[in-house]
């Protein structure tokens, strides 16, 4: 399940970064996308990739 | 039993260790690149040298004094403690400065949200849920604890009511007016609200508070019981600080505090050598590394908090490490007449067995070559003169047994001792070089 969650988090990350490239002159979109990336960081932190056994 | 993060809170011990080691190595490398403090401090140690948790011993502890020194360099006001671009800082906090110049703590939006996520664990463990209307009876100022409580309550879905800019009576009226059913406060201020409510003719148990989370001071079991009895509610404790964040909290089992893993790597070290981990049931100093907060990295921060190491299991099902009890600050321990003395012991005695004492303070002074320790105690106004004398004699005896010290006990007029809203200062060491707490 964790792998599926991580994949979804990575999709959000890509999407937020794409938003930033689509609106480089729009501070509101840039900042809101940046905030999405903050939560991507936290989501990754709370779903650590477990060491391979 | 449910959890804020079921995935993270029930991991096997060895998995926690592996994750924390991996996060530690990442934070270590980050700090070495972006923090001027750690560029200097960690010179000569590489993250490749950290292969096991035992290898942490190769890294010196971070002390508050050196942080003060690095704070003096650019950029103002955070200096070499800041590890991100200053334009990314969105929140300023600072320590209270009771032991020296305050430390200024920069939080980026990311770091602040990371702190809040860790705090959500504390609130959820203490049973706070979206149906709670949580009253915070403080103006938060620049101090972190109640800001964290505020934002974590909001994130968890509680309804948050800020209660600053009111006096205690006004806060009691507000609790009743809006039917608050949760509250967060220092233990001292919780007791003061109860006392004030009684003086207003209101039984504190009728205020409707179901859950109370305390912060800011060590809370002896007897004080927690006294709060539970006064408000007829569940009272929970947690531990943390401005620099390391809040790093452990109490669950519904109320049997010690769970370390918030894997947010924090916590070592409990022998207080004399600060080298080896103590055994379960022993007192040690908590050394904390926050593992995901990048704006202000701390590697092996010496909190100077004295705690009793707990067991690893809990009836709540969480598998994180626990501390059995918070003993107090290492700075609070004093030698009085050659005896090691902790003010918390006195609080424990009074809260447990002397319900007729409303407030108290302790003073140590030197008279000639002798240390003299005095307890100023304020009895409940309904006590008769003869019962005050009996209480005085009992206090003298109980304190002698609990501390091995002979106290000069003075019974004061009701209402004469100061009341505190934030950290109480009930211990005054007036000897040369002494500090007041």
Image: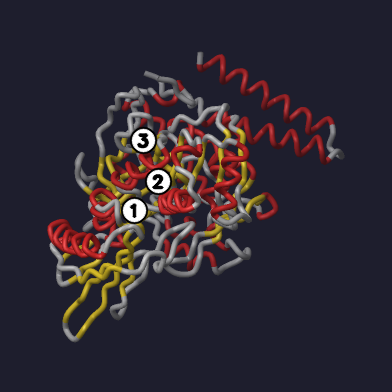
Q: Residue B239's mark?
A: 2
Please provide percent x and percent y for residue B246. 45, 44
Q: Quadrant of residue B294?
A: top right
Q: Between marks 1 and 3, how big is the CA–CA gap?
A: 15 Å
Q: Chain of mark 1?
A: B
Name which of mark 1 and mark 3 comes first in the sequence: 3
Question: Circle 2 marks a residue in which chain?
Answer: B
Across and down, in percent, residue B44 comes to 40, 55
**Badge 3 local density, few (<14 within 10 Å), some, or many (20+)?**
many
Mark 2 in CB contact with mark 3 (< 8 angstroms): no
Q: Which residue is mark 1?
A: B305
Residue at 16% in and 84% down: B369
Q: Secondary structure at mark 1?
A: strand
Labels 1 and 3 in the same subunit: yes
Q: Nearer the viewer, residue B196 or B318?
A: B196
Q: Nearer the viewer, residue A34 or B193?
A: B193
Q: Earlier in the sequence, mark 2 or mark 1?
A: 2
Residue name at image x 29 percent, y 46 percent: B222
Q: Are marks 2 and 1 in contact (CB under 8 Å)?
A: yes
Residue B231's tag is: none
* Position of residue B300 measured from the top left corner of the image (x, y, whole percent): 38, 50
**Residue denoted by label 3:** B258
Colour option used: secondary structure
Position of the N terminus of chain B by quadrant: top left
| In-front residue for pair B284/B84 | B284
Judging from the image, mark 3 belongs to the subunit labelled B
Q: Secondary structure at mark 2?
A: strand
């Amino acid at each position: 399940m964790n792998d599926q969650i991580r994949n979804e988090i990575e999709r959000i990350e890509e999407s937020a970064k794409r938003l930033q490239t689509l609106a480089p002159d729009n501070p509101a979109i840039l900042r809101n996308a940046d905030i999405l990336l903050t939560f991507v960081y936290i989501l990754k932190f709370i779903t650590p990739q477990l060491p391979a056994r | 039993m449910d959890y804020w993060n079921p995935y993270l809170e029930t991991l096997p011990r060895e998995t926690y260790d592996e994750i924390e080691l991996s996060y530690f190595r990442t934070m270590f490398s980050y700090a070495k690149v972006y923090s001027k403090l750690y560029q200097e401090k960690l010179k000569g140690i590489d993250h490749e040298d950290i292969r096991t948790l035992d290898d942490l011993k190769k890294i010196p502890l971070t002390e508050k004094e050196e942080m003060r020194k690095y704070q003096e360099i650019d950029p103002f006001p955070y200096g070499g403690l800041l590890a991100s671009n200053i334009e990314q800082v969105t929140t300023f906090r600072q320590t209270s400065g009771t032991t020296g110049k305050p430390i200024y703590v920069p939080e980026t939006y990311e770091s602040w949200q990371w702190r809040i996520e860790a705090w959500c664990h504390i609130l959820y463990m203490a049973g706070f849920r979206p149906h709670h209307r949580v009253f915070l009876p403080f103006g938060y100022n620049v101090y972190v604890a109640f800001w964290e409580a505020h934002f974590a309550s909001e994130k968890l879905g509680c309804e948050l009511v800020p209660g600053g800019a009111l006096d205690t009576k006004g806060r009691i009226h507000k609790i009743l007016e809006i039917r608050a059913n949760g509250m967060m406060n220092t233990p001292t201020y919780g007791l003061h609200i109860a006392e004030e409510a009684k003086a207003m003719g209101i039984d504190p148990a009728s205020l409707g508070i179901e859950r109370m989370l305390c912060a800011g001071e060590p809370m002896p079991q007897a004080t927690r019981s006294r709060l539970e009895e006064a408000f007829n509610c569940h009272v929970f404790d947690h531990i943390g600080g401005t620099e390391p964040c809040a790093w452990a909290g109490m669950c519904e089992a109320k049997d010690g505090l769970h370390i918030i893993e894997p947010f924090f790597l916590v070592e409990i070290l022998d207080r004399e050598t600060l080298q080896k981990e103590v055994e379960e049931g022993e007192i040690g100093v908590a050394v904390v590394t926050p593992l995901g907060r990048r704006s202000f990295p701390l590697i092996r921060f010496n909190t100077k908090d004295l705690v009793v190491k707990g067991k690893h299991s809990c009836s709540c099902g969480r598998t994180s490490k626990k501390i059995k009890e918070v003993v107090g600050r290492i700075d609070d321990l004093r030698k009085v007449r050659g005896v090691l003395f902790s003010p918390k012991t006195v609080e424990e005695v009074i809260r447990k067995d002397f319900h007729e004492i409303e407030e108290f303070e302790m003073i140590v002074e030197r008279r000639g070559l002798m240390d003299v320790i005095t307890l100023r105690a304020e009895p409940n106004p309904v006590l008769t003169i003869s019962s005050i004398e009996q209480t005085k004699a009992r206090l003298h005896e109980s304190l002698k047994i609990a501390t091995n010290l002979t106290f000069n006990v003075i019974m004061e007029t009701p209402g004469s001792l100061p009341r505190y809203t934030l950290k109480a200062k009930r211990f005054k060491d007036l000897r040369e070089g002494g500090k007041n707490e």
